[in-house]
Structure formats: C-alpha cells, structure tokens
Image (cartoon, rainbow, N blue to C red):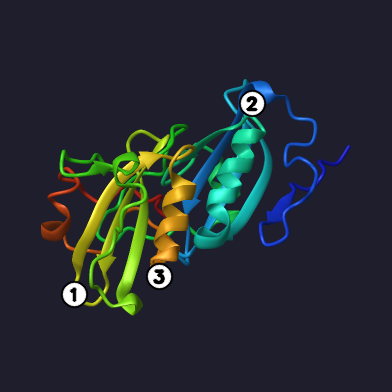
C-alpha cells in the first residue's frame, strides 16, 4: 500500500478542520524553523517522541501575518510548539520543504537525532511580559525598523532583537514564551511599523549583540 502524501498547508488559507487529522493528542509536537527568506517560516507537525517519529503535516507562512495565529491554534489543538534551528527529523524531509539559511564560516557534521537550538541570553534582556504595552521603538525611521525573532537554548522561549537596519544599533531586546508572548509581541511590533523576521540571530556584529547574548559561534549547518 502506498504512503499517502504528506499534507502541506499554506497558512494564507489554513484548513477549517484540524491540522492533525486522527493523530493522538498525547504526543503532538511542532517544530518551527527559520528559513529563507527570513520573513517566512516552516513548521513540522509531528507525533514525538515515539518509536518511529511520525510527521503529520508541514505548514508554511509569513512571520508577521501567520506565526502568532499558528502558535495559538497549535496550542488549542494540544500541541507543544518549539523554535529550533534544525529539527530532529530526517534531513531529506527538511530539505524537501525548508531552505534552511546558511550560517557562514562554520562547517560541521550533519545533526544526529536531536534538535539544534539557539543562543543563551544575558541579564540585559528583559522579559516581554514586563515590556508589553510600552513602546519598543524610539525615533528610528520606520523604514529601517526590523525585529528579529530567534530561537533560544530553551525551545519554548524566543529572543526578540529590535534593530535599526541602517545604523546597525539595537532598539530593544526581549525574551518571552513562545505560547504566551510571541503572538502579542509580533502584533505590537507590526503596529509600531517594524518588519519582522525569523533568524538564527539578528544580522549584527557580535560587538553589538554581546550585551544581549552570551558568546557564541554560528550554529552547525549540515554539510552537503
């Protein structure tokens, strides 16, 4: 018997019925990953852990328009949602649906069966729960306002770096819960006329980022 095709959902027109079809609620886990272009994301809905990991669907959408609503819907459908740089899934499957952006200057072996996660923040990064509702941007020109969302070592958390793309300076840094804070932060920065992207880290020099993240090297990228 042939295997039915994997459902692939464009979140511009999400399905009315459950993404999960008949999958049990006991082990639903969603991996959201940064892809190219950074204004978009890809999510893999899985049953995990299991003796054999089952990928139930793939979802694709825009970070600013769809990510917050998607996380909220997955939570309602009793799934755990994680951000990671490379999910613990078969490499061929990831490469079929996601163009993982390169991390320049760093070569390493393909990942094993564990996810590749993100950075660790410093004490200079405030919790978004303390900043919610207060302006995040100052007098930066709206055309150069960018908010980078990045995975952290804890996959249930995210880092947001608001930066001026022209001056290469940081306007704010905040961390929060993927489930409780991500949608609200995206809504707020869009209302404050910022572009929103999902990356492994904001495209700034380490000298600029060092007050907010611990020393790091670019995360491993599977070799060709």
- Numbered tag placed on residue 104 in the rendering: none
How far apart marks 1 and 3 lie (CA) works out to 17 Å
* Residue 202 visible in the snapshot: no
How far apart marks 1 and 2 lie (CA) works out to 48 Å
Q: Position of residue 106 (x, y in %)?
A: 26, 54
Left or right: where 53 falls relative to 156: right
How far apart marks 2 and 3 lie (CA) works out to 44 Å
Element class at badge 1:
loop
Q: Position of residue 6 (x, y in %)?
A: 74, 46
How many marks overall?
3
Q: Residues within 10 Å of mark 1 (few under 14, many from 20)?
A: few
Q: Nearer the viewer, residue 199 or 182?
A: 182
Q: Position of residue 44 (x, y in %)?
A: 59, 44
Q: Nearer the viewer, residue 132 or 213?
A: 132
Left or right: where 7 falls relative to 2: left
Q: Which residue is mark 3?
A: 193
Element class at badge 3:
loop
Give the answer, above or below, for where 175 lies relative to 204.
Answer: above
- Numbered tag placed on residue 167 in the rendering: 1
Is tag 1's residue or tag 3's residue first in the polypeptide sequence? 1
> Splitting the image into 4 quarters, where does residue 2 fall?
top right
Q: Which residue is mark 2?
A: 52
Element class at badge 2:
loop
> What's the residue at 47%, 67% (across, down)?
37
């Amino acid at each position: 018997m042939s295997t039915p095709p994997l459902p692939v959902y464009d979140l511009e027109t999400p399905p009315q019925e459950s993404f999960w079809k008949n999958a049990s609620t006991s082990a639903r886990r969603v991996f959201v990953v940064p892809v190219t272009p950074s204004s978009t994301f890809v999510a893999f809905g899985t049953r995990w852990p299991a003796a054999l990991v089952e990928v139930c669907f793939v979802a694709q959408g825009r970070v600013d328009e769809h990510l917050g609503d998607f996380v909220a819907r997955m939570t309602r459908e009793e799934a755990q949602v994680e951000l990671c740089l490379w999910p613990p899934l078969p490499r061929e499957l990831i490469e079929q649906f996601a163009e993982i952006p390169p991390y320049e200057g760093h070569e390493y072996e393909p990942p094993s069966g564990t996810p590749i996660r993100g950075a660790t923040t410093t004490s200079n990064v405030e919790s978004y729960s303390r900043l919610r509702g207060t302006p995040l941007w100052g007098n930066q020109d709206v055309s150069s306002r960018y908010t980078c969302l990045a995975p952290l070592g804890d996959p249930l958390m995210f880092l947001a770096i608001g930066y001026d793309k022209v001056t290469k300076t940081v306007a704010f840094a905040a961390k929060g819960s993927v489930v409780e804070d991500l949608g609200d932060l995206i809504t707020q920065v869009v209302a404050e006329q910022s572009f929103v992207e999902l990356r492994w880290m904001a495209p700034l020099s380490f000298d600029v980022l060092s007050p907010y993240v611990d020393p790091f090297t670019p995360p491993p990228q599977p070799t060709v």
